[in-house]
Amino acid sequence: MGHGRSVIIRAAALAGITALLLAGCVAAVLGNAPQSGTAADTRLRGPSDSESRLQGAVRSALAADAALRGADVQVNASGSVVTLRGTALSAAQSSAAARVAKATHGVSAVVNQLKVP
């Protein structure tokens, strides 16, 4: 009778430890309280204030460039890296959009994902 009870206690302890470890993995992937030291999930957050300002500055610079008329460009910023998505009328226009974005104050790099028909 003692051996069976010992096996049940070990199994329960193992199940408890496994549950705690898995809970820690979930917290590390999805984030936890700000002071917990675990990673935060940034996939669902919107742009920060500085990213929004940078996006606006790049959009303004693109709109002001006559060579980019007719292009449909969406701008996203992650930190100081700007991603351009949408459609350019030509490869030259796509390159010009990347050049204008890169020349915008605060932009460290440009990821050009513009499509050319």
Image: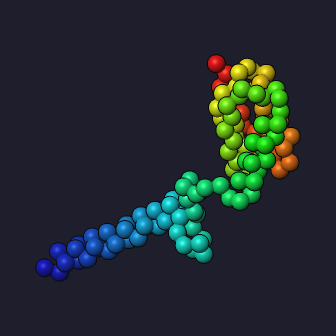
- Relative to residue 47, is residue 5 drawn left or right? left
Is 49 rendered above or below residue 55?
A: below
Residue at x 46%, y 62% (from the top left corner): 26
Residue at x 19%, y 78% (from the top left corner): 5
Q: Position of residue 84 (x, y in %)?
A: 70, 37
Give the total of numbered labels: 0
Q: Position of residue 57 (x, y in %)?
A: 79, 47
96 or 78, nearer to the observer: 96
- Relative to residue 50, is residue 40 drawn left or right? left
Q: Position of residue 59 (x, y in %)?
A: 75, 42
**Residue farthest along the left direction in this orientation:** 1
Q: Image quadrant for the N terminus?
A: bottom left
Residue at x 31%, y 69% (from the top left corner): 15
> Can the viewer see residue 113 in this picture?
no
Q: Position of residue 48 (x, y in %)?
A: 68, 58
Instruction: Specify the quadrant of the image occupied by residue 83.
Output: top right
> Can the viewer see residue 76 in this picture?
yes
52 or 19, nearer to the observer: 52
20 or 1, nearer to the observer: 20
